[in-house]
């Protein structure tokens, strides 16, 4: 399954094919890392959804971070 994990700690951030069996594995990994690093993590599992995980490990549906696409012209 294709997964994108956004985190300011590069050791946690990931984008690509996840070797695990289920989307729950990815979410548990992200919750553990969020707690250990004490920072928010965003998980996007293509075809499943996007979740934000707080530094205390709470999981919420939806994006926490929004990607920047450069400067907009007016």
Image (cartoon, rainbow, N blue to C red):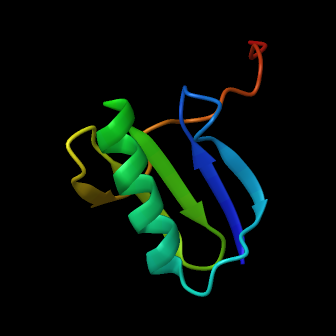
Residue 39 visible to an observer of this rendering = no
> In this view of the protein, which residue sits in the foreground, 74 or 34?
34
Whether residue 65 sits left or right of residue 4 in the image: it is: left
> In the rendered image of this protein, does residue 38 appear above or below residue 42?
above
The residue sitting at the front extreme is 36
Q: Nearer the viewer, residue 73 or 3?
A: 3
Residue 51, compared with residue 45, is above or below; it is: above
* Residue 13 appears in the rendering: yes
Residue at x 67%, y 63% (from the top left corner): 3
Q: Residue at x 25, y 50 (%)?
A: 57
Q: Residue at x 75, y 13 (%)?
A: 71
User: Which quadrant is the N terminus positioned in?
Assistant: bottom right
> Going by the image, does 44 lie left or right of 24?
right
Q: Position of residue 55 (x, y in %)?
A: 27, 37
* Corner quadrant of residue 51: bottom left
Image position, residue 6 (x, y; %): 58, 41
Q: Quadrant of the C terminus?
A: top right
Q: In the image, is 40 to the left or to the right of 19? A: left
Toward the viewer: 28 or 69? 28
Q: Looking at the image, is 57 positioned above or below residue 19?
A: above
Looking at the image, which residue is at 56% across and 28% down?
9
Count of marks, rendered view: 0
The extreme bottom residue here reads: 21
In the image, residue 62 above or below residue 13: below
């Amino acid at each position: 399954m294709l997964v994108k994990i956004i985190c300011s700690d590069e050791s946690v951030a990931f984008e690509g094919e996840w070797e695990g069996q289920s989307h729950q594995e990815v979410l548990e990994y992200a919750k553990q890392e969020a707690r250990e690093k004490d920072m928010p993590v965003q998980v996007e599992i293509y075809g499943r959804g996007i979740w934000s995980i707080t530094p205390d490990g709470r999981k919420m549906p939806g994006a926490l971070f929004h990607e920047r696409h450069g400067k907009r012209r007016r």
